[in-house]
Every structure is written in C-alpha cells, then in structure tokens.
Image (cartoon, helix red, strand yellow):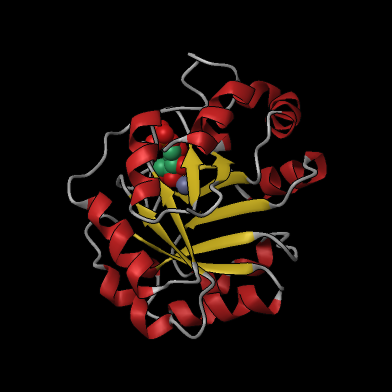
Amino acid sequence: MRNIIISPSLMCADLLDLGREIKALEEAGADYHHIDVMDGVFVPNLQLGTANVAAIRRAASIPLDIHLMITDPENKLGWFDIREGDFVSVHYESTPRPEKALLQIKDKKAKALLAINPETPVSVCERFSGIIDGVLVMTVHPGHAGQKLVSGALEKIGEARKMFNEAVVEVDGNVSYENAKIMKEKGADMLVCGSSSVFNGIYGYKESIKKLKGAK
Ligand code: DX5
Ligand code: ZN
C-alpha cells in the first residue's frame, strides 16, 4: 500500500490567522498545502486568489497543491507563483484545451494533475496520459467545503488507479476518516483533507493527520 500524502485544504482553516495555521499544519505533518482557487464562474464561489497564493507561499515551508477551479487556466497560470515541486490541478471541464495548461505547469517543473468533476468519466484522462503526473478525482461538486460524497465517485478512484498505475491519484471532497480508508483501498495516494477530517475540530491537527495516514 502506498504512503498516503496529506494535503489539508486551507480554505477550511482559520483564514483570520492563516500564518499560524500554516505553521501548525506543517508541524502536524502535512505534506502539502491545498489551495482552492475559485473564480465564481467555473464554480459558484470565490476563494483564495493570486495574492492569497503568494502570501501562503511566503509563510509555507512545504510545497503547494494548487487546485485551479477557474475558466481557461491556460491563459492565467502566469498569475500564480508556481514553483518546482508544487502540484497544480486544472479541471478537464474548464477549458477545451487542458493540455495547454498541463504543459505550462510542467514547464515550471511542477506536477501537472488533471482534475475531473464527479460526473466526468475517468476515461477522458486517457488521452493526457503522456502529459499528466496525476489525476485529481473530485468526490464532491467543486466550490464548497462541507458537502457529502457524490455516489459513484468512489469507484472512479479505482478506475484512475487502474488507468495510471504510476501517476498520483489525489482525492478531494468529504475525506472523512471513514471515507479515507475506502479511498486508500481503492488506490488513492493523496488526500485533500478539509472540514470532514483535519478541520472538523474533533482531533488536533497532529492526531488527525496521523489517523488519516494510518487509515487502513
Ligand atoms: C471543494 C474543495 C475541497 C474542500 C474539501 O471544492 O476543493 O478542498 O474544501 O473539504 P471537505 O472535507 O469539507 O469536503
Ligand atoms: Zn480542492
């Protein structure tokens, strides 16, 4: 079983004290900071813009996992301070030319992931197999934290794992402690953890991340 990578979703952190939150998450063992960038067009919400990404970068000492929920990402990637070692996901549904954005991400020596909404079949990822470093399987409709799993989305994790044996299979949405176990069994190796686990206040960050990493 692969080592699970934990990427806490900063939109669920205390945004009034994000510097302290970033440090606390890193001390608790987070592997990446998941940054949900939302434009209010591709998804019905506005969240964490370019200035937020730059500020998070200044405070972070681990790489960023930037989830772009924006239209035409290929024309906007230059707005973000993307660095070597980051993960950057662009949505298949957000542009007629996902490959353009994916190639730009790779030019910056970051990992390029293709994100797919719950209703988008894994099969669409096949034609990008020579470009992508991973797939971001959305298990909720992008745009808001606190949602429940979309039924059938869990099966897509296994399909993505089967299609891309070496690539990263990242899962985003309602990653609870129970769901994390199933997601891992189906082949996920990177979990975006938001209000369903790390930020639900039941355990501290350190214990939450330990539970998620150990989820069997
Ligand atoms: C939703 C975001 C997720 C979300 C995860 O569009 O991409 O990162 O915040 O948080 P929960 O655990 O609340 O689904
Ligand atoms: Zn996300």
Q: Is residue 176 visible?
A: yes
Farthest left residue? 151
- Where residue 167 appears, as percent x and y from the top left, is 50, 69
Q: Give the side of residue 68 with respect to residue 42, left or right.
A: right
* Vertical relation: 215 (above or below) 24: below
Up-down: is 66 above or below 76?
above
Seen from the viewer's position, the closer of residues 8 and 79 is 8
The residue depicted at 61 percent of the width and 68 percent of the height is 111
Image-quarter location of ligand 1? top left
Classify the position of the C terminus by image quarter: top left
- 18 lies left or right of 118: right
Q: Position of residue 22 (x, y in %)?
A: 71, 32
Quarter of the view holding residue 147: top left
Q: Number of marks in the image? A: 0
Along the horizontal axis of the image, is 161 left or right of 9? left
The residue at 60%/47% (across/down) is 49
Q: Nearer the viewer, residue 118 or 207?
A: 207
Q: Pinpoint residue 133: horizontal percent, then vertical percent.
A: 54, 72
- Kindly identify the residue that appears in the image at 51 percent across and 28 percent down: 211
